[in-house]
Amino acid sequence: MRGDTDARERAGVAEQVPPPVPVTVAVPTAVPPPRAERRLRRFARFIGRQLLREFRVVVAEPVRTLVRRGLSGVLLAVFTAVAVLTLHAVDQTPTGATLVRLTSHVRGDIPLPLVLLRTPLSLFVPARDMPALPGIPVLFLGIALAQLVLGRTRTVVVAYAVSLAGTLSARVMIAAGPRWWGLPPEAAQVIDTGASAAVVGLFAHVATVKRAPVLFLCAVTPTVLRSIQKPNLAGREHLVAITVAVLLGLLATRRDPALRDGPGLA
C-alpha cells in the first residue's frame, strides 16, 4: 500500500508541473532608408561609376597608348608647339614680322580666297593679345590628348574645321553689323591668328566623343564663360568652334558608337 501511495504522489506532482512556455525573441527588422537617401546613394554610385569610366577613357587609355607608341603618339603636339615657338621668334624681327604678316595674318577685311590660303599657317602664329609661352602647355596637352584619343587624321580635320568655322562665322558677324549676334565694323581690322579656337574645339570634341563631362567642365566651360563675358571677335569664334566641335562629336558617335569607349587611335 505504501508503494502505491508513493506512486500516486509522484504521479500527482508530475501532473502539477506546468508545461514549458515558448519564449519569443523579438528580431529587429531593418528599416528601409528614406526615399531621398536612396536616391542620394544611387546618385553617388552613378557619379562614382562615371568618374571611373571617364578616368579610364580620358587618362588611363591615352597613357597606355602613349607608352605603347612613344613620341609618335604625340607627334602633332610636338610639331605644333615647335612651330608656334619658331614663328613667335621669327615674328620678333622686322623682316620676320613682315613675312608672318603676309603669309598668316587673317582679318575680316581681306578677300576670302586669301583667308582660306592663310588660315592653316595662322593657327601656328600666337595671337597678338596673348603671350606665346604660357599657352604652350595647354596647346600641347589639348593636341596630344586629341591625337591619343582620336587619332592623327581626325585631330587635324577637327582642328582645321573648327578654326575655319570660327573664321568664316566672324566674317558673317561683321557683315551683320553690331546687332545681337553681330560685330562692329572695326572688328574687321582685328588680326585673327592663334590656335586657341582649335585647342578648345579639340577639348570639346574629345569630351563629346568620350562622354566626359568633367573634361568639358574643366577645359571648355571657362572659355565659354569668358566668351560670354567678353563678346569680342575671339570670344565669338571660340563659341562657334566649340559648337561645331560638339556637333562633329555627336555625328561621329552616332555613326560609330564604339568611339565612346574604344581605345586610343594614335
Image (tube, rainbow, N blue to C red):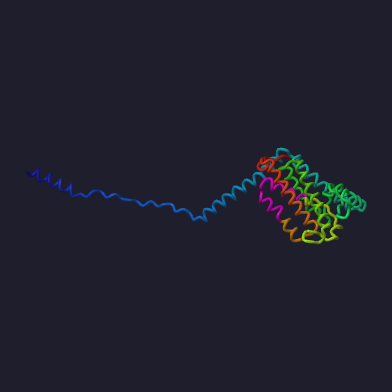
Residue 249 position, x and y percent, is 71, 46
Q: From the top left corner, tell me how far across and down residue 25 is, in percent.
A: 34, 51
| Stretch in magenta | 198-221
Find out whether residue 214 is within the magenta segment.
yes
User: 193 and 158: which one is in front?
Assistant: 158
93 left or right, relative to 17: right
Residue 2 versus residue 237: which sits nearer the camera? 237
Q: Residue at coordinates 67% horizontally, 45% vertically from top-left?
A: 210
Location of residue 116 in the rendering, given as x and y in whole percent from the top left corner: 85, 48
Furthest-top residue in view? Answer: 68
The N terminus sits in image quarter: top left
19 in magenta? no
The residue depicted at 63 percent of the width and 45 percent of the height is: 53
Could you tell whether 187 is left or right of 246 in the image?
right
Nearer to us in this view, 203 or 177: 177
Which quadrant of the structure image shows residue 225? bottom right
Q: Residue at x 8, y 44 (%)?
A: 2
Specify the quadrant that holds the C terminus.
top right
**Percent from the top left, x then y, of residue 66?**
71, 41
Secondary structure mostly seen in magenta is helix
131 sits to left or right of 19: right
Farthest right residue in view: 95
Residue at 23% across / 48% down in the picture? Answer: 19
Q: Quadrant of residue 239?
A: bottom right
